[in-house]
Amino acid sequence: MKKQPTELTEVKTANKFQSILQKIGKRNAIIACAVILIGAAVWLNWVLFSDSNAADGYDGYDQPSGNISDNLNNNDGDTTDADSADTYFSATQVSRQRARDEALEVLQAVVDNVDASDEMKTEALASIAAISDEIQKEANIEALILAKGFEQCVAVLNGDTASIVVSADTLQVAQIAQINAIVYEQTGIAPSGVTIINK
């Protein structure tokens, strides 16, 4: 009696899947999933803790994000606004650092894992290097913007976009141009990819 060709195909497919799973290993698959989850957590953390006015966007790179009239009306000398801004900047920096530390911890665990493949270790090392480079660029941007006279600043890089939050009642066109120039010099991100928010 003749065997059905579909049964043979299904057996071959099942064997291929099992052989791939054996090559990768369950542990490495779990580590890869953990790295993906940590990346998603960092992104979600950035989305949830970034300023809600950032979603409004702006028409051009020479205009700040958010409602300008609200920013003008906030200059009433109330110390609670200053305390709120201080808390925002501190909380954002701590939250960003915590998320990065967790991501680096997971990536380092992949590098240290003797069962991880060379490819996974190489990817983890590349991710560690990219995060370190991003941290350095953000620190440079923040330091240079503070040198321009702003009291506080938080820079968040995400691929080919940057979000810059500065402590200011209003932003002048010249200040926005300076911030865009700093970001471009440090990262190569064009002004169209930069969102500037005054808080």
Image (cartoon, rainbow, N blue to C red):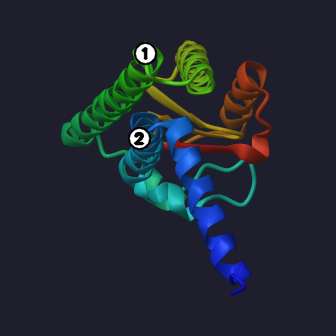
Q: Quadrant of the C terminus?
A: top left
User: What residue is at 36 percent from the left and 33 percent from the top?
Assistant: 99
Classify mark 2: residues with Cα within 10 Å, few (<14), some (14-19) or many (20+).
few
Q: Residue furthest bottom?
A: 1
User: In the rendered structure, are the residues bearing label 2 and label 1 in contact, judged by CB atoms less than 8 Å apart?
Assistant: no
First along the sequence among labels 2 and 1: 2
The location of residue 157, given as percent across then percent down, is 59, 34
The location of residue 143, given as percent across then percent down, is 54, 13
Taking depth in this image into account, of 158 and 11 the one nearest to the observer is: 11
Taking depth in this image into account, of 40 and 117 the one nearest to the observer is: 117
Write down the residue under mark 1. 114
Taking depth in this image into account, of 78 and 121 the one nearest to the observer is: 121
Count of marks overlaid on the render: 2
Mark 2 vs mark 1, CA separation in Å: 14 Å
Taking depth in this image into account, of 169 and 95 the one nearest to the observer is: 95
The location of residue 116, given as percent across then percent down, is 48, 24
User: What residue is at 51 percent from the left and 40 percent from the top?
Assistant: 22
Q: Quadrant of the N terminus?
A: bottom right
Instruction: Name the element at disc 2.
Output: helix
Mark 1 belongs to which amino acid? Val
Q: Is residue 30 left or right of residue 145?
A: left
Write down the residue under mark 2. 26
Classify mark 1: residues with Cα within 10 Å, few (<14), some (14-19) or many (20+).
few
Mark 2 belongs to which amino acid? Lys
The location of residue 148, given as percent across then percent down, is 60, 17
Q: Quadrant of residue 187?
A: top right
Q: Is residue 143 left or right of residue 113?
A: right
User: What residue is at 24 percent from the left and 40 percent from the top?
Assistant: 84
